[in-house]
Image (cartoon, grey):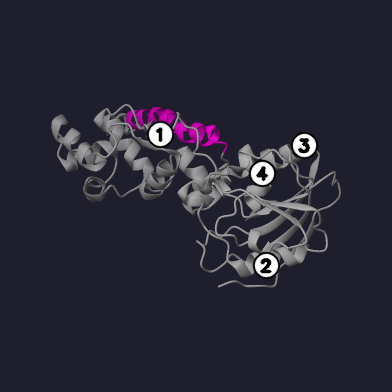
Amino acid sequence: MSVFLCKYDLKIARNSYMSALPLITQTRRSRGMTQADLALEIRVSIPTVRGLERGAGNLRTMVRAMKALGLGWGWARQGEDAAALLAARRRKKGFSQAALAEKAGCSRPTIIALERDFSGSVSILLSVLAALGVRQVLRALDMPGRAGLVPVTNAPVRDLVMTPAPLAAAVIAHFAEQISGSILDPARGQGAFFDQFPSLLQRRWCEVSEGKDFHAWSEPVDWIVTNPPWSRLRDFTLHAMNLAPNIIWLAPIVNLTTKARLRDLDEYGFGIAELLLIETPKCWPQSGFQLAAAHLKKGHQGAWQVSRLGLVVK
């Protein structure tokens, strides 16, 4: 009976530590990210992100999610070895690795792996923290040059994946018969889109790295076309809908069609006129999410036309 009570009490203690894990969800939402956004960011599936937010999954994936969200372990300062600090706490408590394993309901090799290279499962870590009396699981890191949890503007390093020129040319060619008047590339980068806009158009561009921030642009145009920074897709779309009646974004469909994104389109009177399905270039990170060139059109209320680009870019 005493063994049963010990394990039962440990389960209650571990579950109480789960109250710290909503910090992942809260931080994600404060950045305007969906579970799909975070999944794309750390290159895992949406169910894996759901699991992390429930306290399931493995620690290596958890660390990737924490890094993306600017979070750290609650018992370690930034730059400190979290595994070594756990081992130090164990010794301070007077526990051997075997004794801690018994208290946490796992094996001694599991504790060894946790203290050696911080490998294992999130659920085991929560049990170990409960056994050691560590009360803070996660905390927000102080990010130099940033205010709280506000993402950096326009082009964080993870967004610097340049569009191959042949892919940009194919996208432009697909929509060429519809495009006329003035056109803006709000994130020119190396010019894959801008340099191939038809010369008969009135061409404009922005590029934050060259001192021309799209969010400071106020001149109306007829078309906005680019591969936008995916981490700022919502901000880009909201601003673009104030400037142009036609927008073409090269982005994963999952980033374009969340409930929040579709609600934004409805509120601004836009609809998805076409999704041009595209094979992810082989030189890009492979996420498993379908890439598309999406035509967002003001006043469109009909069905979404879905087509496929035959080009495969290496």
Residue 42 position, x and y percent, is: 47, 50
Label annotation for residue 258: 4
Q: Residue at 80% x, 58% y: name it.
A: 179
User: Could you tell me the amino acid type at mark 2?
Assistant: Ala
Label annotation for residue 268: 3
> Residues under labels 4 and 1: Cα distance?
30 Å
Query: What residue did someone put label 1 on?
Result: 145
User: Could you tell me the amino acid type at mark 4?
Assistant: Thr
Q: Which residues are magenta?
A: 9-32
> Residues under labels 3 and 4: Cα distance?
16 Å
Q: Within 10 Å of the Cα at label 1, are there few (<14), some (14-19), or many (20+) other Cα atoms?
A: few
Q: Nearer the viewer, residue 80 or 233?
A: 233
Query: What residue did someone put label 2 on?
Result: 169
> Residues under labels 4 and 2: Cα distance?
28 Å
Relative placement, left or right, of 266 versus 256 is right
Q: Nearer the viewer, residue 134 or 68?
A: 68
